[in-house]
Image (cartoon, rainbow, N blue to C red):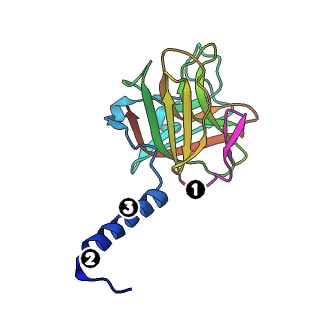
Amino acid sequence: MVYSSSHLPLLLFTLFQLIVIQNHLFCKADPTDGFTTISISQSNFEIQKPYDVPVNQRYSFIDGVHKFWVYKTDKPHTTSSQTKPRCEIRITGNDYSSGVRQFEGYFYVPSGSSGVSIMQVFGASPSSTTLMLRVYDGTLYYYREKVIESNIYNRWIRLNVIHDVGASKLKVYINGVLKHEPSGRGGDHHYFKFGVYTQDNESDRMESRWKGIKLFKK
């Protein structure tokens, strides 16, 4: 079939439509699409560590990387606490009780760290947390109920957690891929935490590293 020059605009328009459709089909949406960035800085990072050791013996921040480590024999974070050892950052100044909030960060867990929570959405009822992501033998779990990602040791992984308070739903993304949509656990006061917090069947030493921490809302 021979096309005349009068057909050229129509052919170009059709080609443009095909390109748009192809991009729509093959370019997946990002978890942060539609969200607004919340400005945070180091001043929003409250470090919780064993009460009897200096911060620099359980935490470092070098070249943009937060490094946390604890030993299973460590003390809790306060003299009155009955909880297990932790070294975590509690993000302050951005507590929430409604709306939709999102946490983003890149984490790295070295071989051998196990029986440890590395990220939490704090606040629930009657329990303490709405979400906890734990590492057991190189696998990332939602609590200990569902596998989120296997073979996580010794590699940087992007994590996005979305909490819709009104809908009582959460979404957990690994490297931009939706992995789990658990229900909320109640409560009217929430905030994000990341680092290491000892759980059950813990290793002698537990460590996680984090970078690129961001918060979003909509």
Q: Is residue 55 shown to the viewer in this render?
A: yes
The type of residue carrying mark 2 is: Leu
Answer whether residue 205 is magenta in the image: no
Please state which of the two labelled residues, at mark 1 or mark 3, is closer to the viewer.
Answer: 3
Q: In the image, is residue 89 above or below residue 212?
A: above
Q: Secondary structure at mark 3?
A: helix
Query: Do the numbered discs 2 and 3 sit on residues whose CB atoms are within 8 Å?
Result: no
Residues rendered magenta in the picture: 139-156
Dot 2 crowding, Cα within 10 Å, few <14, some 14–19, many 20+? few
Left or right relative to 40: residue 97: right
Q: Secondary structure at mark 1?
A: loop
Residue 107 image offset from top left, x and y in percent: 53, 47
Q: Which residue sits furthest left?
A: 6
Residue 87, picture quadrant: top right
Dot 1 crowding, Cα within 10 Å, few <14, some 14–19, many 20+? few
- Quadrant location, the N terminus: bottom left
The numbered mark, 2 or 3, whose residue comes first in the sequence reads 2
From the image, tell me which residue sits under label 2: 8
Residue 196 image offset from top left, x and y in percent: 58, 36
